[in-house]
Amino acid sequence: SRELATIGMQINQKLETLPAQVLSPPKILGKDRKPLEIQKHQYWSYTVDSKIENGKQLVSWAVVVFASKETVPLNQISTFISQLVKTSQDTGLDVRNTQPPIQYAAATSDIKRTLEDACSAASKQAKASAQLLVCVLPSSSSALYGEIKRVALTVVGVQTQCVRSHNARGAHRTKLLSMIALKINVKLGGASLSLSPKDRPCMDIPTMVVSADVSHNTEARNMSVAAIVSSVDLQACRFQGTVMQHPQRLEYIENYDAIIRQCLRAFYAATRQKPQRIMYYRDGVNDSQMDAVKRLELQAIYKGCSLIEPGYRPKVTMVIARKRHSTRFVLQQQSADEMQNCVAGTVVKDAITSPSIYSFFAASHSSIHGVTKAPYYLVMHDDSSFDPQELRQLTYNLSFTYPIAMRTATMPASLYYAHRLSGAGRLQLSRPFNELPRFRSPEKAAEEKEKAGSKNRKKKKRQAEPEVHLVPVHKNIEGTMYFM
């Protein structure tokens, strides 16, 4: 343009050409360790012959329809449930009760009483505690959805699967039913698939995968929500999560040492092994906060390990993942004007990456619409001195383990878990924020008690340091992947 020309600036009309690498897809295993066929580096399906790896048993469950029988007729709900049961069984779930009780309730009804009544009906029919409630909601019901999740997670203590009414009464697509079945299985404690041992580079010794995400809610007095998830198996398929809330816009996570100690205890309880390596994928850190997050959170991780046992120091690798950038990649064809999306597994590791920190772009999937946006990964710390190729391959392979889809995710699955958990954390609040219990390590609590000499000094100290609150869930669903 003339304006740019006046200041001596010109824009090249040709896109920059960069060297790239395409990683090979891993071998993913279903039931009985049978490999699943991957198409186009990113798609697969579950069939009668290739089922999910660990399908759980569903015995005690019920359906609650938050609409009238005129709006959502009983025969349509019955048909939907029958097809859902069939798809679930074909996928690999062991659905013992194929005709759960169906109840109707008004959207304005008492949610606690409605869910408790549905649990009682499920328990009475199956002679066992309710495992799941399928809730059919009006098409536009975000407030109702949030209230159902809050009551189920914090008061009643039951897993829920919400379905929009138009999906329940319309044409029942196999893909939609399969996704619902996968979500139910994960919430019940099952696993969809796993990576073969040779496709878990950097995990040749007991390894715990940890991911964290901090989101900021400007509508709630600039409150920050920190979500941390950690693996509880050697295959990095099952995860447990913790949510904390700060009343300040903090990018780093306070009291991270105590959370890491909880993660280590959960890993040991499930595997009877202490992790010798921690793979830490961190989401959502900008340039100005990157050094502080690295310093404070790495220090907290090492301190959390020492709280388990003095001298215990597993090797830590910290990778920051960024999605908010403007870089896009397309595959150039023979004609310079002909472009198409990069194939899944495309990695760019030179020319446009950081000159001071090892980093790379990795496109784990090829977009259906628009141009593929590859996350940008920065390796901030690596005690294990991994071969860069192995670290890139592991990052790509972990995107195959997202359990509620039949295609690769854009990032390692654990980063998606942390993102989903930070959203679910806002729905878990059963009390006002200022009434939540403060979350501190026992060491910090003892130190405060010892040093506090008067009520005034205690009050000043509490005001000086940021408040960190643990957001609780019901004991019945602690340690589960309820956030899926």
Image: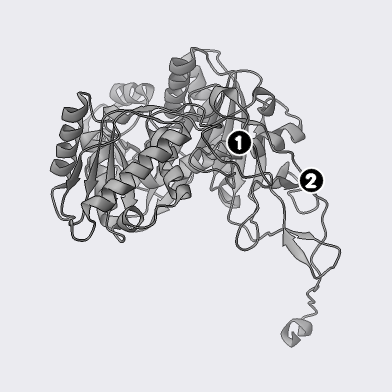
In front of the other: 93 or 214:
93
Closer-to-camera residue (435/205) = 205
- Reading the chain from its start, which is encountered first: label 1 or label 2? 2
State which quarter of the image contains the C terminus: top left
Horizontal side, residue 158 vs residue 7: left or right: left
- Classify 10 Å Cα crowding around label 2: few (below 14), some (14-19), many (20 and above): few
Q: CA distance from mark 1 to mark 2?
A: 18 Å
The residue depicted at 24 percent of the width and 42 percent of the height is: 63
From the image, which quarter does the N terminus lie in?
Answer: bottom right
State the image coordinates of residue 65 (x, y, percent, origin top left): 22, 50
Q: Position of residue 336 (x, y in %)?
A: 84, 68
Left or right of residue 318: residue 269: left
Asked whether residue 252 appears in the rendered view, the answer is no
Residue 178 location, quadrant: top left
Classify mark 2: helix, strand or loop. strand
* Horizontal and vertical percent position of residue 108: 15, 55
Q: Height in image: 434 above or below 351? A: above
**Front residue of this view, candidates 25 and 171:** 171
Q: Residue at x 59, y 52 (%)?
A: 323
Residue under label 1: 398
In the image, 308: left or right of 346? left
Disc 2 marks which residue?
21
Instruction: Work out whether residue 407 can be spotted.
Output: yes
Name the residue type under label 2: Gln
Q: Vertically, is 62 above or below 272? A: below
Question: Which amino acid lies under the numbered mark 1 shown in the image of this protein?
Answer: Leu
